[in-house]
Every structure is written in C-alpha cells, then in structure tokens.
Amino acid sequence: SSLDMLLRSTCSRTAQPLSWLSRTRPSAIMPLRARINNPSFSDMPSEQPGDEPNDVLFNSHYGVRTIELNRPKKLNSLNGSMARKILPRLKEWEKSQLANVIVLKGNGRALCAGGDVAALAKDNQSGPEGQQRSKDYFALEYKLDHTIATYSKPYVAFMDGITMGGGVGLSVHAPFRIATENTVFAMPETTIGFFPDVGASFFLPRMDGAVGTYLALTSEQIKGVNAFLSGIATHYLHSSSLPDLEARLAELNFGDDVSYDTRLRIINDTIEEFTTGMPHDAPPHFSTNVRIAIDYCFQNVHNIDQIMEALVATEEREDSPPEVNKWAAKTRETISQRSPTSVKVALAQLRRGAQWNIAQTFQNEHNIASKFMEHPDFVEGVSARLIRKPAQTPQWSKTSFDDVSEAEVNSFFADELKLQLPTASDEAPYTDYPYAWTALPREAEIESFVKSNPKYDMNGVVEHFIRLKRGKMGVREKVEEVLNRRTAPANSKRGFTWL
C-alpha cells in the first residue's frame, strides 16, 4: 500500500528499525490472499477446482514474507494445490521492493514430510491420463524447487520438525536452512520404489565423502544438530528462538543499493545472534568408526555389487569394532529390501548429478520421475507402505539387482530434456551452491587447507576456520571431527598427514 511505501521510505532515510511501527500500527501482520490476479504472472500456475483453500498461509510482517505449510494432519505433505499457490507468490514477492526476506515454515510437527505420493499412486492406477497428471505434478514441483534454488531474494527455511522428500526440495537449496532439536531429515524414496528427487541429484553428491550416497540408498534419518554438522542445514537454533528470529528479520531494512551478497551476510549475522551454543546431550549421528566405514563401503558409485560386497566384507571382518560389524549388517539388509530398480537408478543419478548444473538437475529429474510414473514399482511401493493397512512388504517387479540391466537403467536418462524452468536470472546455471559459505566448512575445504599448510597443528587449523567463518558456532566441532578421522600425525613434531 501507499502507506507502507511512505513508512518504509521514512525508515530508510532515518535508519530506524521497523519495530517502532508497532507502536502506531497495532496490526502489523497482515494475511495475504492466496489468489494472485496480477496479469504479469499469467504464465504461472493457477488454482484449480478442488484445491484446498488454506493449505498454505501467506503473511506479511514488515520486510518478511512468510510461507506456512498448513496441512498438519498430513505432516504438510506437498501437493499440487500448495505448489500452485507458492510458485506465483514467490514470483510476486521477487518483484516487490517491500519484500526483504522470505521465510518458509510448517504448521505442526513437520516442515513437510514429502510429496503427497499416495494421491500420485492412485492417479497412476487410472492409466495414461492419470500418469500424465502425476508427471505434470512433478514438473510443477521441480519448477518451484528450481525457483527457490535460483531465487534473487534471501530465503530462510525453518527445518523445524520432519523434513523429508518434497520438504527437502523446498528447503535444502536455500541459502539459509535452520535445523532445530526437532529436525528429522531423510530421503526415503527408494523405500517406495522411487528415486531421491527434488534436486537430490545436486545436493547429495556434494556432501562430504560418501554420506550422500549412503543417505540416498538407505533412507537413513539425520536428526537435530547432526543435520547442521553434516551440512544439510546452515544453522542450528533451539525451536523456541524461531519466533524471535522471524521478528528480528522483519526489522531488517535494506536500501536499494545494498547488494544481494551483503544482504545475505547481514541475515547470516542476524541468525547467528540467536545461537546459544552446541547441545551437549546430542551424540554424533555417526561414530568415527562408522563414518570411516561409510566412506569405504559407498565410495564406488558405479556398481551396487561392489557396495554390497564391501558391506559383507566389513560385516565379516574380525578386527572391525563390533559397532561397525553391526552397522554393515543392518545397512546391507536395508538396501536389500529396497526396489532393485530404484537403487540402481539412484546410483546412476548420483554419479551423473555430480556433473549437472542446477537447471540440468531438475530437467533430468523430471525425465526420471516421468519414467517411474510408468513403472510398477512406484505404485507397488506406495500402496504397500502407505495405502494398504496394515503396511506390507512391497513385491518389487525385479527380485535382485542382477535382474535390472544397464540398458534399463540408462533408459531413465535417455530422453531429451524438455522441462522448461522459470528463472529471472540471466546468469549461467551454477554447478555448486554460490552461498556455500553460510554453512560449516566442507571436508574438501579442510583437506585443501591441511595439504597446503602441512606444518599447522590441530589448533592452528581449527583457529583458521573459525576466523574464516567469523566465529560461527559448530566450526570447532566440525573441523576437529574431520581432522580426527582423516589425518594422522606427521613425522615431524608439528602438522598432519592426510589419510
């Protein structure tokens, strides 16, 4: 409104935070209508008959625009109705001078537990027309995820609660991803005869070591602060701090001359103001021995047989710690229960995805998803796990990995890339996240520094990264864990040898 513009202009000239407006405007939070009538968004998806009216709530609070997923009874599972509301809203806010920060959050105990796959499986059973509707849904979802991954305004995802599948796509590509003590992350797609999508082809291969491959094939859950330490989240806060953080973000007032990178740094510093230290009662998700075993067993993304053989060898090694023997046996059994087609396609996807840019990621994933909509394993997996009561063990179309030929795997990647992605950026699609600096240092960064500075001791390496990350919480814990696992003392009195 003209009043909003006048007030914001006044704040900009006087350099006052927007919080003073609360004394003169008793209703500072204004719910926005879900429908957008601006003709400039005519190419954006529009609501359809049957869409739920309040499955997404949009609000404006000074400079913050919030997206609240609002299907708590279904753990905010993402469907077409929600995506058709969120995508045009993001495009509208991208053009607004009053919108400074976008915040994504969920109502209830989940940010978003995934896509509404039960509805898709039911559609697929109706034949080619239903399968096409499912393909169209994935096209819409991936356009939304790509928009978030290339968004020109700061985007903050509150990963407070269950964040899986489709919920990962709405959050993991953002420059700011906040984990809490309630966070539960997983990519469970191979469990239902599908593949890790929503940009997992880009995100998982860029995680430390072989952790991304392990998470893709096992659907392992990462909880709480461990989502932060593993790089899934960029920050860790207690959930009780989120409302205050949101209010503080709303007070930020950027002038037109403030660059995007500067805005990110200001927001990063603002989030850091609300950190209260690492929790002392949260054990690491992986012990040092298990983490070493993950890199050993999952290092070869070219062959599932070699991964399974490595797990068997680790399970049977008499000199391995018992926890590693137990982990290897459990992991081998877990992968054996997955759809053989899903596992082999996922491996090929991660191998290729390491080379894809962010646009190619979603275009290729749309092709893969379209193939799975025609594949019997998806309907069987969803039906057995989620629809039939009680849940059953799926009967996959192929009973072993040997039954899935390389030609069949390659067919998931053979089609021309057709998905048209909306983007307002003229820059070339990136091949690594341009805002990786908001997270803890990656293992590759630590390795490069150690090899380039062989005479630094552990304290010297840790202090270097603390300075580099401007005192960020968690840096010490992350760097020390990597050094303890990946280095050995050098022959001289100081320094390390990288293993």
Image (tube, rainbow, N blue to C red):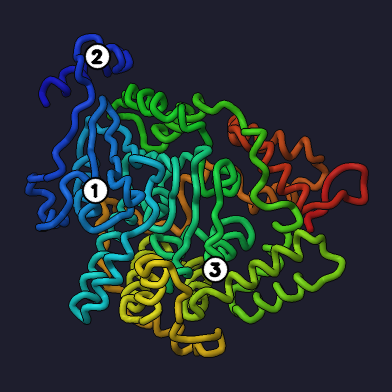
Q: Quadrant of residue 317?
A: bottom right
Residue under the point 38% across and 56% down:
114
Disc 3 marks which amino acid?
A: Leu
Disc 1 marks which amino acid?
A: Ile
User: Where is residue 427 drawn, in percent x and y?
Assistant: 34, 54
Kindly tell me whether residue 160 is visible in this rendering: yes
Residue under the point 35% across and 72% down:
369
Q: Is residue 90 above or below residue 340?
A: above
Indicate which disc residue 86 carries: 1
Q: Quadrant of residue 384?
A: bottom left
The residue identified by callout 2 is: 21
- Is 428 on the left-hand or right-hand side of 453? left
Quadrant (top left, top right, bottom left, bottom right) of the N terminus = top left
Q: Secondary structure at mark 1?
A: helix
- Front-lying residue, 144 or 96: 144
Residue under the point 32% across and 45% down:
72
- C-alpha distance separating marks 1 and 2: 28 Å
Disc 2 marks which amino acid?
A: Leu
- Is 271 on the left-hand or right-hand side of 402? left
* Marked residue nearer the N-terminal end (1 or 2): 2
